Image (cartoon, rainbow, N blue to C red):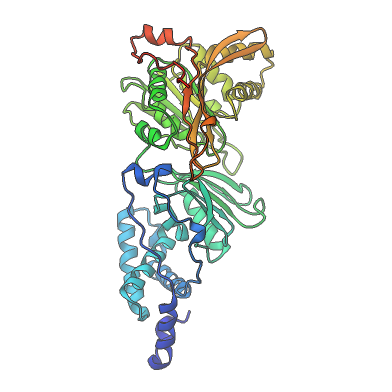
Amino acid sequence: MSSLAERLSAKRGGAPALQEEVRRAPVAAPVAPPDRTVAQRGEASQPTAPVEDRPQQLDGLIGLKQRAAEALFVRIGTRINDPDLSEEQLHALVREELNAVVEAEQAPLTGEERQRLINEVRDDVLGLGPLQRLIEDPTVTEIMVNGPDNVYVEQSGKLGRAPVRFTSEEQLRRIIERIVTRIGRRIDESSPMVDARLEDGSRVNAVIPPLAFSGSTLTIRKFSKDPFKVPDLIRFGTLTPQMAQLLQACVEGKLNVIVSGGTGTGKTTLLNVLSSFIPSGERIITIEDAVELQLQQDHIVRLESRPSNIEGKGEITIRDLVRNSLRMRPDRIVVGEVRGGETLDMLQAMNTGHDGSLSTVHANSPRDAIARLETLVLMAGMELPLRAIREQIASAVDVIVQLERLRDGTRRVTAVTEVVGMEGQVVTLQDVYLFDYTAGQDHTGRFIGVPLPTGVRPKFLERIHDLGIPLPAGMFDPPAR
């Protein structure tokens, strides 16, 4: 491997050309540190320039960065996988060796270019490479990699192309393998799909060839380091203060709540907020495919499903965990999402003394949520009559909270619906709150409407009053037109 020092041996011939190459290279803007103020997070952030509008320029430091990375691997060797080194010691070792590598190259770099080179090589070796800057950007909520050359992000609810790329498919595969191996998962040709998570809880999904025809695909849904709370959702327009009071009373009153919505509508975020209403003196058991919930209580047991090993054995499903949780003396069972036969076990738990359970389901409306729960129960393999299934659902589920992602990119609660019971063969529902679409949009295209009470007083209100949970008078009165 020819080093940059050799190329610069003829200083008069080589240095000016390389210096001009480096001078033309764009320098990435420094990443602003995450701020705890709501104004810089999620949908409440100030409008920023879309990523796709930023100039996409060829990075003149790519070759220099690759040589520095190769030299760094030669110097470190197997120490990068030394289990005796802590994360802090490994970072210190890489920083020290990387400074020595850059010194040995004798590249005519400015201080800013030198620091950028060190940061990018360190990200390639220890972090997520080109994605590290996007991970640290608080305005980016989702990262989508469609092969090494196509990286897209979501900012303020809008999709745009990011000005970063991977140098090769091999670099992208290394980043994917680094993510999944940290949590004990694997990805290869025999198991080309995986769900994983980052250290901060962000959700990761990866698909590699031969399933991903255009190159390895990586999707990262970022989670805020500072979990959203009720005031945040009120500022975003997701909830109203009256609706937040009602949902808090429902959770404290141990009503069984299902959060319904499509992909990316904020179901897990709302589930986090609802779970924050659970009293601290109760034992909570969370069950998820990949741990995402960020509950703040102390008495929590977190359970995570496990895929099968390379021999096809050892799989632990959500249904296995739901069944086992019933033997763990739970006060509350929180299932991250029901998508299979575990729905039957969860409904039975709700009907047998485990009130106050929470979960999410994929559906486009409260009525669709009931139909989807019926379908998921049938996936349990039990030949139950449809009426028995509907009676189980009507008896177990008390409230359905419907979330939607509107055209303006915001996520709103569009319905709070009570499950009343059965009339004949039909599960009866009544809407307590509905989103007001008639209010229209402002000059930026943002929906002005908010969820409004329908005027219906829910039947579960008696149970809430019996438990001594106060609710303000008039919160179910329809607004005056």
Camera sees residue 321 = no
Question: Looking at the image, is 426 positioned above or below residue 163?
Answer: above
How many badges with numbers are in the image?
0
Depth order, front residue of 363/454: 454
Depth order, front residue of 434/226: 434
Depth order, front residue of 111/451: 451
Residue 150 at x, y percent in the picture: 57, 59
- Residue visible at 40% across and 34% down in the picture: 233
Residue 181 at x, y percent in the picture: 48, 49
Camera sees residue 147 = yes
Q: Residue furthest front?
A: 481
Residue 367 at x, y percent in the picture: 61, 22
Question: Looking at the image, is 305 positioned above or below residue 325?
Answer: below
- Residue visible at 48% across and 45% down in the picture: 444
- Residue visible at 40% across and 17% down in the picture: 475
Q: Is residue 300 left or right of residue 190?
A: left
Question: Looking at the image, is 363 positioned above or below residue 70?
Answer: above
- Residue visible at 43% across and 53% down in the picture: 48
Residue 242 at x, y percent in the picture: 39, 23
Instruction: State which quadrant residue 113 falls in.
Output: bottom left
